[in-house]
Image (cartoon, rainbow, N blue to C red):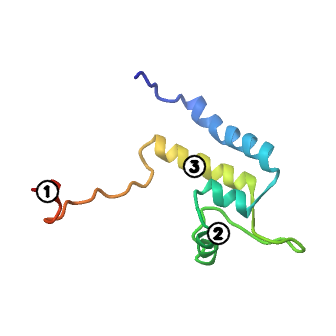
Amino acid sequence: MNTKDPTDDEIQSLPNSYESTLLEKHGELMDGAALRILLHMKHERTFRRAIAASALPVGVFRLAGRKGWYARTRDVAAWLASVGNAAGTGLAERKPERKPSRSDPAHA
């Protein structure tokens, strides 16, 4: 398979691409349900716990007279672009490799 590295121009255009796509779909504010899906959180409870622990990658807030949580769509797009750029440069967090245990059959 022939894959090419992205050019600097392509990397620079990522934030604009994310932003325009998300703004078109969600408008200026993304509701909590859409953010939870984007973050691959299966359960509402997990999302609420992440909010309580301030563990979400973007700021969320409540609006007077409305239910639920909201995030600025532009902030979400900027975060996505930063994660994408870090992954492209090898700077993204990686899970540590699991060391085989003595009881692991593959270890024998």
Which of 26 and 5 lies nearest the eye of the viewer? Answer: 26
Percent coordinates x, y for residue 44 in the rendering: 64, 69
Q: Decide: marks 2, 1 in contact (CB < 8 A)?
A: no
Q: Amino acid at mark 1?
A: His
C-alpha separation, residue under disc 3 versus residue under disc 1: 38 Å
Tell me the residue at 49%/47% (across/down): 86
| 16, above or below 6, in the image | below
| 1, above or below 56, in the image | above
To which residue does mark 1 refer? 107
C-alpha separation, residue under disc 2 versus residue under disc 3: 25 Å
Foreground mark, 2 or 3, reads: 2
| 49, above or below 33, in the image | below
Tell me the residue at 60%/29% (across/down): 9
Residue 44: which numbered mark, if any? 2
The single residue placed furthest to the top in the displayed view is 2
| 61, above or below 30, in the image | below
C-alpha separation, residue under disc 2 versus residue under disc 1: 39 Å
Residue 3: which numbered mark, if any? none
| Quadrant of res 84 | top right
The tag earlier along the polypeptide, 2 or 3, is 2
Q: Amino acid at mark 2?
A: Glu
